[in-house]
Every structure is written in structure tokens, then in C-alpha cells.
Amino acid sequence: MTDNFYRMTHTPALLLGLLLGFGPALSAQPNSTRFASRNAIEKVCLELEHETRLKDTQSGRFHLFSSNCSIDRDFYGSWERAGDTLSLTTDKRPSINLESVTETGVSTDQVLVSLRSDDPALLPGLTAHHGDQTFRVGASGTVTLNVPLTSVFFSHPGMAKAVYIPVNTDAAEVTISVRFLDLHLPSLVDDRWLLQGKHMVYVPRAGSLRSEQMTLHRGKRCFYPQE
């Protein structure tokens, strides 16, 4: 971790109030709002780009930098707002690739889907979405679905989804070769924060990078590693 940081330019109080929604918007050009942590151990700086006022904008771009004394992570992506909840998703992230599929037999009831991968430890983290139902993949890398098969989406926390579209919708057994790509990439997927006045409170979820609550404070000076 770099020991050198520089402080961002301090925004005058009046302009800051305008950008954060306490007055009329200056223009329709993208503005930004910055939040930062007060935690000396794990430092987080979040910059949200938005049109006019943050409270009137439902989506935009973000830049989040995090440093916890052992590793630095630099994220860029898109944010969406629903009510008081803000969701962050990075542009680049690991992904699931379905490389080959074998369909055999005919079934009138259920189909056994067997997943194979060079990273077998990741298979139990997969979830299969079939129709309006959701199924967890078992420790053996298998999941049983009802026929007829329609499109099956596979998801994994922190990864981009993959879709399997069957040719034989009444197959008795399906074997899929799965490859997990770009596992080295840090990522955020639907990383949720609750907006509370001048603060943002992290909402822990299964699969999120952060396992404990953290509060970011609006208007606090941000920091980034010196380039």
C-alpha cells in the first residue's frame, strides 16, 4: 500500500450545497458528490457522478477507492438508486463461461444438471435460476430442475451471470463444463448502501466484499493514492 496520499480540492460551502440538493441545479452537466470514511484502519472514498442533484438522479457513474492497510482496490462502475438504497456494480468483474454442454436421454419429470470445472471449489457457490425458481448447486456440483427446460441462468456472488439455453428441453441429464474467468479482478455486484441524510451506511449481504458495517460521511475530504 502506498503511504502517499493527497487531498482533493475543498469545495466551497455554497457550491457543495447546490450539488447535494440544497438549492437549484446550476446546469444539466454531470456533477459529483463525495463520501469518505473516518476509519483509520480501512479508508474508503466514494465519488458519485450524477445529473443535477443527487436526490433527483436514479443512476450514474461511480469511483470507489478502498485501502485497508493490506490491499488497495480501485473500482469504477455504475450506481443505481431505489428510494434510499444505493447499489454499486463495477464495470469489470469475474465471469462464468459455459464452455460445452451435453444433453442425453428423455425425461417427463426432472433433469439432473451436472457441472464440471477446473475450479470445483467454486461450484457450490453457484445458483441456478429456472423460470421463477431458484436452486443452489450442491457440493457435488449438481442441481435437479423440472422439465421442460427453459433458459437457465447461473449466478455467483461477485461474478457476471451466464445463461444455458437447452436444445433438448426434455433431456434426462445435462452435463455442463464451466470455466470461471478473470478471478483476479476485484468486483462489486449490487453492493448496497443506505442513504441517511449526510451519511451512507453499508448494508452487508452474502457475497459482498465487506463483512461489517461501515459509514461514509458526505463532504469529508477524500483521498486517493498519489499517482
Image: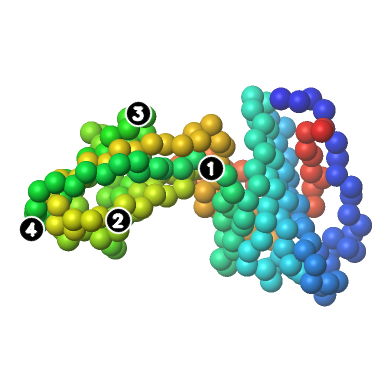
104 to 182, vertically: above or below: below
Q: How many marks?
A: 4
Q: Quadrant of the C terminus?
A: top right
Which comes before the other along the chain, label 1 or label 4?
A: 1
Verify CB contact (< 8 Å) between mark 1 and mark 2.
no
Label 4, on which residue?
108
Residue appearing at x 30%, y 56% in the figure:
165
Q: Amino acid at mark 1?
A: Arg
Q: What percent of the width, then of the height, locates residue 95?
A: 46, 42
Q: What percent of the width, then of the height, locates residue 23?
A: 82, 72
Q: Nearer the viewer, residue 18 or 160?
A: 160
Task: Give the left or right position of residue 89, taking residue 39 as reference.
Answer: left
Label 2, on which residue?
165
Residues at marks 1 and 2, CA–CA distance in whole angstroms: 23 Å
Q: Amino acid at mark 4?
A: Thr
Label 1, on which residue?
93
Residues at marks 1 and 4, CA–CA distance in whole angstroms: 38 Å
Verify CB contact (< 8 Å) between mark 1 and mark 4.
no
Q: Amino acid at mark 3?
A: Asp
Task: Give the left or right position of residue 219, taking residue 59 as reference.
Answer: right
Q: What percent of the width, then of the height, locates residue 186?
A: 57, 37
Label 3, on which residue?
118
Residue appearing at x 64%, y 28% in the figure:
71
Q: What percent of the width, then of the height, locates residue 39?
A: 70, 36
Residues at marks 4 and 3, CA–CA distance in whole angstroms: 32 Å
Which comes before the other along the chain, label 2 or label 3?
A: 3
Which comes before the other along the chain, label 3 or label 1?
A: 1
131 to 183, vertically: above or below: below
Circle 2 SS class: loop
